[in-house]
Structures are given as C-alpha cells and as structure tokens.
C-alpha cells in the first residue's frame, strides 16, 4: 500500500468538490455542497463553537479518505446527548470542552463518517482515519472524541479501536411498493387507520391545501418563506435557530436535485412549510415551521405529504428524524442508531462505560416494547 499524506483541513473550500463528493457516495448530508453551505453561511464556524478539523488522507493529489471532524466548545446540534457527562466533569473541576466531534452538524442521519473510496484497502483507510482522529484528540489534549450516527462498517471499526458504543432509537417508515396512500392505510390496525384519516380530514376542513415542490422548481420566495417558518417555530420553542436563511438559500442553489419543500396554504396564503432531502431510495425529513396552529397540520406537512411523495417516486424509506414516539402510531417502526465515544480520563471512561451498558440494556427493552405496539395489523 502506498504511503498516504495526512492533512487536517479547516476550510472545506480548500478541497475540490468533485474530489470530496467521490467519497460521499451520493449521501446529501456528506456532500461538499451541504457541509460547505453550513460553513459559508456562518452556521458552523469557530465563532459559534464548531471549528472544522477535517481529517484527510491523500495519495499524490487524489483524496482517498476523509472525516468530517469538528473541535467543539458545547454540545448543541448533535442529537446524541452528553450534557450529563459534561456536568459530571464540571462538578469534579474538570474541563469537558473542548471536545472532538465526528458528525454532520444538526443532522441525525446514519451514514459513513470514515469516508473512503470503494477500493480494496477501504478498511485499512477507515482505520487510518479513526487513528488520526484519536491521535489528534491526544495531541491537543481534549477530553473526548465522539463519532455519531455511524454506519455498520464504521461502528465495527470504532469497536475494534476499543471505543465505547452507544445506541439510540429513531423511527423510519418503509415503502414496500404501495400503489397509493390508501394501500398503506389498509395495512394499519383499525384504530390507527381511523386516527390518520381523521387528522387528514381536519386539515382539509380548515381549508388548508398542500403542495410538494422539488428543489428544481422551488422559487427563492418559497425558500425565504420556509426559512421564516423554521425561525418562527424555533423561537416559539425557545431554541435559537441553528440554521439561517443564508444556509437555506445556499442549499437551494447548490442542491436542487436533493431537496423537497412541502408548503401549506390557507385561503391562498402560505402558513407552514417543511424541508426534506431525498435520494433515489430514501427521503429524509429535516425541519419544519408554521405561523398558525391547526390540529393535524404538523403530521400532514411533515409526514403524510412526504409518504405520498415516497409512494409516487418509489422511494423505499422515509427517515423521520430524531426522537418521536408519536411516529409509531403513524406507521413508523423503531430502528437503532450507533455512536462511538472515547474519553481520555480513565475513571470517567470507566464510569461512562458502565452507564452505557445499562443504557444499552434499557434501549433494547424499549425497542422490544415498541415492536409489541406495532401499528400494523397482526398477521
């Protein structure tokens, strides 16, 4: 195997998009366009506690491996919660921040984190990337390294490096090839089917109309409206908007083939909107917002319209995002996600390991319980 050159990159603009995207394997969230939009819009920069430290391996001038890695001064925008660990460090007079985070900011979607070309030495390159991240963590003296929403290959690699694994649960909807929404409804138990029909009727009775607009057809005004909805709803929930209007306009321009806006109007005036991303196989529900409350509007805008889009386009999976046990009643089923963690402090590492063992057992029991409450008709 040829020698590889390691470079740590703080500005994604230094890497040609085509070279980066060759490793991203059509994952919209790992694409150069998405990660660069986060950086260029100011949503992910050192000033807001996300300093890029992208680990890259080069063979001559070819990029053969890369890892989206950030030096972080907080735990916002991650969806794998370590606030309690940070608090425990603080109580013992130890610094938890800064820490290193290998993840896609604000995006709880499983994918490759140790990005390699599909070559015969892919596994070796994954190991080199992870070792480089662990070595960087030790060299700069951070408390920890966290790798979030890992796919199977990366999870195995992290485990082989003795990182601690952590599991969580998401809810995904599967489309086995439904001809239409009614065919999906017919697979549900009677009470679940009835509830969804009622929710959809209420939205209609309120005089609300919905349309799906792919990025190719969306206008700048529609994107501006979505950004306003998103900011308004974040504000109502007292969470600062993680993403800004500049970010949304950047992905509108650079990722039109991957984006889908759902827009709800009442009496001709837009009132709510949701943003999704999609590939040939999967639809990803990302963010939503509204200016008016109507019973059932959230489910219609965020779920039912997206399901109909999947059915129409023959997309196999709809990932509804983080959390949300309420999705179960609407035909989503539990799926476990994986993250991996390394803590420099031996005693804390041991305590977290014991905690994660108990948490893993609890998650396993929770998934069993959820599966027993399946929304589908029992065979």
Image: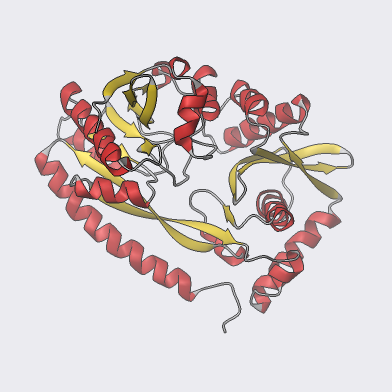
Judged left or right of residue 222, residue 145 is left
- Which residue appears at 27% of the width and 29% of the height? 99
User: Which residue ends up furthest to the front in the rendered image?
Assistant: 1
Q: Which residue is drawn at 71% across and 29% down?
A: 223
Q: Exactly how many numbered labels are in the figure? A: 0
Residue 42 location (% of width, % of height): 51, 18
Question: Is 301 left, or right, of 108 in this rendering?
Answer: right
In the displayed image of the protein, which residue is found farthest to the bottom?
379
| Nearer to us in this view, 39 or 239 | 39
Which of the 4 quarters of the picture holds residue 219? top right
Seen in the image, is 185 located left or right of residue 332?
Answer: right
Q: Quadrant of the C terminus?
A: bottom right
Residue 244 visible in the displayed image: yes
Extreme-right residue of the structure: 267
In the depicted structure, whether residue 60 falls above or below residue 88: above
Residue 17: % across, % down: 51, 23
Instruction: Tell me the quarter of the image containing the N terminus.
Output: top left
* Residue drawn at the location 22% of the way across and 58% of the way down: 357
Coloring scheme used: secondary structure
Residue 242 can be seen, yes or no: no
* Of residues 143 and 159, the one drawn nearer to the viewer in this rendering: 159
- Would you identify the image quadrant in which residue 361 lies? bottom left
x and y percentages locating residue 258 in the rendered image: 64, 38
Task: Using the image, determine if residue 200 lies above or below residue 221.
Answer: below
The foreground one among 54 and 94 is 54
Q: Which residue is drawn at 13% across and 37% down?
A: 345
Specify the quadrant of the image occupied by residue 245.
top right
The location of residue 183, given as percent across then percent down, is: 73, 70
């Amino acid at each position: 195997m040829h020698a590889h050159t390691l470079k740590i990159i703080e500005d994604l603009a230094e890497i040609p998009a085509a070279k980066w995207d060759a490793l991203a394997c059509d994952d919209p969230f790992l694409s150069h366009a998405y990660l660069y939009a986060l950086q260029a819009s100011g949503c992910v920069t050192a000033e807001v506690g996300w300093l890029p430290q992208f680990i890259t391996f080069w063979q001559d001038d070819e990029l053969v491996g890369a890892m989206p890695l950030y030096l972080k001064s907080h735990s916002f925008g991650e969806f794998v919660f370590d606030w309690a660990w940070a608090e425990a460090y603080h109580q013992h007079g130890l610094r938890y921040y800064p820490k290193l985070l290998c993840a896609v900011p604000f995006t709880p979607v499983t994918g490759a984190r140790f990005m390699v070309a599909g070559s015969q030495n892919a596994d070796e390159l994954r190991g080199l990337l992870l070792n480089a991240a662990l070595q960087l963590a030790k060299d700069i003296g951070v408390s920890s390294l966290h790798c979030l929403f890992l796919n199977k290959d990366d999870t195995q690699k992290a485990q082989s490096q003795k990182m601690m694994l952590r599991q969580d649960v998401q809810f995904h909807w599967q489309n086995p090839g439904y001809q239409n929404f009614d065919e999906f409804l017919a697979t549900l138990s009677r009470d679940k089917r009835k509830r969804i029909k009622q929710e959809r009727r209420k939205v209609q009775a309120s005089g609300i109309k919905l349309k799906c607009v792919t990025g190719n057809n969306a206008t700048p005004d529609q994107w501006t409206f979505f950004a306003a909805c998103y900011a308004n709803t974040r504000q109502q929930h007292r969470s600062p908007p993680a993403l800004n209007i500049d970010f949304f306009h950047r992905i509108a321009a650079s990722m039109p083939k991957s984006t889908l806006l759902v827009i709800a109007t009442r009496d001709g005036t837009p009132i709510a909107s949701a943003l999704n991303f999609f590939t040939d196989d999967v639809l990803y529900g990302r963010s939503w917002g509204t200016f008016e409350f109507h019973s059932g509007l959230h489910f219609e805008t965020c779920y039912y319209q997206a399901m109909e889009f999947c059915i129409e386009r023959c997309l196999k999976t709809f990932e509804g995002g983080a959390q949300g046990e309420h999705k179960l009643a609407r035909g989503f089923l539990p799926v476990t996600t994986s993250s991996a963690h390394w803590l420099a402090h031996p005693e804390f590492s041991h305590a977290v390991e014991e905690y994660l063992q108990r948490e893993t057992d609890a998650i396993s029991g929770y998934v069993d319980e959820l599966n027993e409450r399946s929304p589908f008709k029992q065979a």
